[in-house]
Amino acid sequence: MFSYSFGDKSFETLLEAEGLTAAFNANLEKAVTYAKSLAASSLLPFARQASDGPDMAPIADAAARINATCDDLVVLGTGGSSLGAQAAIALARFNKGKVRIHTPDSLCPFEMDLLFRELDTRRTHVLAVSKSGTTAETLAQLLACRAWIEAGEHAANLGDHFTFITEPGKRPLRTYGEKLGSPILDHPTDVGGRFSVLTNVGMLPVAVSGLSVKSFREGAEEVCDDFIKNPGAATAVVGAALTQTLNEHKGITQVLIMPYAESLRAFTRWHGQLWAESLGKDGLGTTPIRAVGPVDQHSQLQLFLDGPNDKFCTFVTIPSYGKGPRIDPAEAKAYGLDYMAGRTIGDTVTCQSRATQETLRAKGRTVREIVIDALSEKNLGGLFVSFMLETVVTAHLMGVDAFDQPAVEEGKVLTRQYLNELDI
């Protein structure tokens, strides 16, 4: 599925050269002990989304109903209620099902106006997602979508245009869905939004897109099995121990995720929220940086190479020699591009990734390469759960709670106050 490495030198040699062997081993021991405690309790809920779980049928039924009645699906949600789905359905960007999926996760008045002008109310379905059922941005978009659909041509039952995912209990989003008479799926109560990609939150859009929910979850199950059986070698555990060691002893305050595949661009946004919101607490944390190769070699690489050495760099690559269009030899040679003659686009990308990593290592940067054998649902499911586990283990080593976000609540309170004070 995927493997990790730190270049031509052995990991032990790199640690020894940096004088980090003892510190890393101490952190690794703590990480392994914690990983074993998680394994003893069947891991965390976000990692227990089974490929044959009881929610598989409701997800499939909801996707079939949406596919049968609309041409466009608008997914309303912000943060974890949207980013996971965006990262997952990106695999379908060149092989979409019949339904176009829109994810206006940023509350932007201009984008909403454009979306309403583009879509047909008769053939539009809205999926509103909020774990708490009180997310202001999602509720605002929902009210706007309902008014837009109601003012246009629509099904006899307005509620047929909507599906909701929220926790059980009395909460605004659920009450709204019940009054509309729309289908409501339960958001798992024990899974936070930013960890929800493998639940119905991320997997319903996956099913609508024509991708395989089963394969996503099978990939996650495979990674979890490895995590349980051999935590000391698991990508998540080693990555967490190294991140903490570099932060404590080398002043590494930023973590870079840089896949060499455009389909993984949305994955970097998902990881950014997961990492920042889980670890940035009590004056602690490392800052996530998003980049995509090779395009960001022409924008951010100068900083990575010649700026402060404060980043732990993770590259995600897919073997691509011989893949993609092939450059015509005669055309290349005619313009002095002999090095491109007969090469494929995949050859170029692979060589760029290799050259970038080697240059960073030569500059003293710590670089980890995660190689996945294909862009597939199974591999992406595995990456999702691996990075979630890495985040949780890192939080444990830091001594913070990975699952809360107390600081952002203050802004939510003030937003409601300011809205109440507006003159209308």
Image: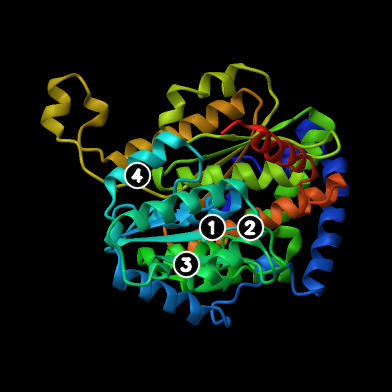
The image quarter in which residue 112 lies? top left
Residue lying at the far top of the rendered structure: 306
Q: Say whether disc 4 or disc 2 marks the residue closer to the N-terminus.
A: 4
Residue 239: percent from the left, percent from the top?
70, 48
Q: Which residue is mark 2?
A: 386
Residues marked 4 and 2 touching at CB (< 8 Å): no
Q: Is residue 260 above or below residue 232?
A: above
Q: CA distance from mark 4 to mark 2?
A: 35 Å
Amino acid at circle 4: Leu
Q: Nearer the viewer, residue 397 or 233?
A: 397
Q: Please name the residue shown 69% across and 41% down the image.
A: 416
Please, is residue 21 above or below residue 388 in the view? above
Q: Which residue is mark 1?
A: 2
Any part of residue 50 in sight: yes
Q: CA distance from mark 3 to mark 1?
A: 35 Å
Q: Which mark is residue 115?
A: 4
Q: Dot 3: what SS?
A: strand
Q: Quadrant of residue 21?
A: top right
Q: Residues within 10 Å of mark 4 (few under 14, many from 20)?
A: some
Q: How many marks?
A: 4
Mark 4 → mark 1, Cα distance in angstroms: 38 Å
Nearer to us of marks 4 and 1 is: 4
**Dot placed on the residue nearer the N-terminal end, 2 or 1:** 1
